[in-house]
Image (cartoon, rainbow, N blue to C red):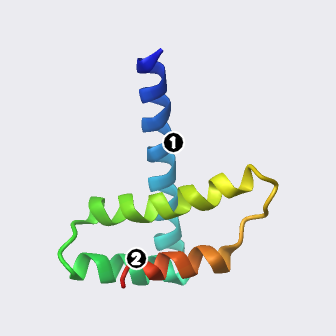
Amino acid sequence: MKEMEDAEDAFAQQALTQAVENQIAEGHPREAGLVMLALTSRGLDHDQALEKMADVLASHVAAMQDDVPFDVNAYARDLLALQE
């Protein structure tokens, strides 16, 4: 059972990371690329920055389970908070 949960967690993390990578590549929200540049310029490697950004995305996706629509502006604001 634990192995299944670990596999599901790894799959979810990979999906979130890929979503952030896509946002950076597509430039939407533009804050994704800006935050990636800010975090890596501070010494985080690309994967560490992606993990932090994926965590922010995860919290916004989790809020959708409560029938709250995805708020791209709130997500962008929370991404920007990572560089503070």
| Residue 82 disc label | 2
Spatial distance from mark 1 to mark 2, Cα to Cα? 21 Å
Residue 7 location (% of width, % of height): 44, 28
Residue 76 location (% of width, % of height): 57, 79
Name the kind of residue labelled 2 in the image.
Leu
Query: From what the image shows, is residue 3 above or below residue 16?
Result: above
Q: Mark 1 = which residue?
A: 12
Mark 2 residue crowding within 10 angstroms, few (<14) / some (14–19) / many (20+) = some
Residue 46 location (% of width, % of height): 27, 65
Q: Residue at x 74, y 49 (%)?
A: 65
Regarding residue 75, the answer to whether it shows in the image is: yes
For residue 44, what is the image quadrant?
bottom left
Name the kind of residue labelled 1 in the image.
Ala
Nearer the camera: disc 1 or disc 2: 2
Judged from the image, the secondary structure of the residue bearing numbered disc 1 is helix
Q: Residue at x 55, y 55 (%)?
A: 58
**Farthest residue, direction left:** 43
Mark 1 residue crowding within 10 angstroms, few (<14) / some (14–19) / many (20+) = some
Q: Residue at x 51, y 42 (%)?
A: 12
For residue 2, what is the image quadrant?
top left
Position of 13 with respect to 67 (left or right) is left
